[in-house]
Image (cartoon, grey):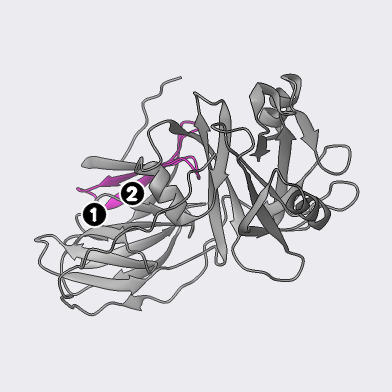
């Protein structure tokens, strides 16, 4: 399906967020941003910005969209979930580009690339991360991770180009708290080269797999909540499903799914749904499209020129599977 949608004057760049299913178009002439619902193909909101806005950067994990404005010396902070402006980062130079560094700061570069300023992120979904799924066509294996380093290595092709993103996402917690349980991650090499991972928040399943010779414990991958015996989730969370291929194709493979329709299609193809209640809910996770707009104070950002960047070697990681 295609559609022609209106935007502001001087539309010159757009950024798509597959996690939020939105397209953010900056309009240089009238200093606005058009927020488009990519599924409904309609304009949701027009957001006022500073003069000469540049291309937006989506921080999906933090639930924000960041838009530098060259002639206003500002970076607008927009809530990705609804397009409302929630804050402003003021600069003392014409901001042009934004990036994130390894310490979770934002780096804002001026239009002449002569100065860089680092500030802490505005995070509307604290203590969470977004898990992304990948598919290995040769092995027929699905794999997911919420580890930002592992995801970056996958996207950069350092595990090979065979792993393709499926554009399926869900959110997890990154720290323990009340009503959250740890998700243990295990790895099996028994079906080499079709290696496999499994994650579970259920202690009895984790301990049973640890005790077997077929699985090796790797880490605590994240934190989720458990559904009750009826498969219901607590407020502020949404269901996450898990299906199992029964070891067909020569390797065990478990798939986590946020979308019930996909879960039902997998079940129809012979995968076994695992979980509690009539709907077979496996776990409960924080809402993917999190980050409600709130009133935030502007964050001052003094001009500073950092020392030259030092290259840091990337540590080796085990191959996913």
The crowd level at tag 2 (other Cα within 10 Å; few <14, some 14-19, many 20+) is many
- Whether residue 124 sits left or right of residue 242 in the image: it is left
Give the residue at x 79% y 43%: 281
User: In the image, residue 268 lies at what x, y percent?
Assistant: 75, 20
User: In the image, residue 95 lies at what x, y percent?
Assistant: 20, 63
Check the image and report above or below for 281 versus 3. Answer: below
Whether the magenta-drawn stretch holds residue 65 is answered as no
Check the image and report above or below for 31 versus 274. Answer: below
Counting residues from the start of the chain, the first of labels 2 and 1 encountered is: 2
> In terms of image quadrants, where is residue 247?
top right
User: In the image, residue 109 lies at what x, y percent?
Assistant: 19, 63
Judge by depth and name the residue closer to the eye, 94 or 41. Answer: 94
Judge by depth and name the residue closer to the eye, 249 or 213. Answer: 213
Quarter of the image where the C terminus is located: top right
Judge by depth and name the residue closer to the eye, 94 or 208. Answer: 208
Q: Which residues are magenta?
A: 16-43
| Residue 281 can be seen, yes or no | yes
The crowd level at tag 1 (other Cα within 10 Å; few <14, some 14-19, many 20+) is many
- Whether residue 110 sits left or right of residue 283 in the image: it is left
| Number of marks in picture | 2
| Residue 9 can be seen, yes or no | no
Name the residue beneath numbered marker 2: 33
The residue furthest right is 229
Name the residue beneath numbered marker 1: 53
- Whether residue 109 sits left or right of residue 285 in the image: it is left
Whether the magenta-drawn stretch holds residue 34 is answered as yes
Helix or strand or loop: what does disc 1 sit on?
loop
Tell me how far mark 2 sits from mark 1, CA to CA: 8 Å
User: In the image, residue 88 lies at what x, y percent?
Assistant: 35, 69
Give the residue at x 66% y 29%: 262
> In terms of image quadrants, where is residue 64?
bottom left
């Amino acid at each position: 399906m295609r559609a022609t949608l209106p935007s502001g004057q001087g539309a010159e760049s757009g950024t798509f967020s597959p996690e939020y299913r939105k397209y953010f178009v900056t309009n240089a002439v009238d200093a606005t941003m058009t927020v488009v619902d990519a599924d409904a193909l309609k304009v949701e909101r027009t957001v006022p910005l500073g003069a000469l806005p540049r291309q937006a950067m989506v921080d999906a994990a933090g639930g924000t969209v960041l838009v530098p404005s060259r002639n206003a010396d500002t970076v607008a902070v927009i809530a990705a979930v609804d397009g409302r402006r929630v804050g402003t980062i003021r600069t003392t130079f014409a901001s042009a580009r934004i990036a994130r560094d390894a310490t979770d700061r934002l780096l804002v570069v001026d239009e002449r690339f002569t100065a860089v300023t680092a500030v802490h992120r505005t995070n509307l979904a604290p203590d969470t991360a977004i898990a992304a799924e990948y598919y290995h066509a040769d092995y027929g294996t699905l794999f997911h991770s919420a580890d930002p380093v592992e995801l970056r290595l996958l996207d950069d092709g350092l595990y090979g180009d065979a792993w393709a993103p499926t554009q399926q996402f869900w959110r997890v917690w990154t720290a323990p708290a009340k009503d959250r349980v740890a998700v243990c991650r295990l790895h099996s090499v028994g079906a080499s080269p079709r290696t496999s991972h499994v994650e579970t928040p259920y202690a009895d399943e984790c301990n049973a797999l640890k005790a077997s010779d077929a699985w090796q414990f790797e880490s605590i991958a994240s934190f989720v909540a458990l559904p009750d015996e009826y498969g219901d989730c607590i407020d502020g969370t949404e269901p996450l499903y898990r299906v199992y291929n029964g070891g067909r194709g020569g390797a065990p493979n478990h798939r986590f799914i946020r979308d019930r329709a996909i879960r039902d299609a997998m079940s129809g193809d012979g995968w076994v749904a695992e979980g509690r209640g009539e709907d077979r809910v496996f776990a409960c996770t924080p809402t993917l499209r999190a980050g409600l707009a709130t009133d935030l104070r502007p964050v001052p950002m003094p001009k500073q020129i950092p020392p030259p960047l030092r290259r840091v070697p990337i540590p080796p990681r085990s191959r996913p599977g």
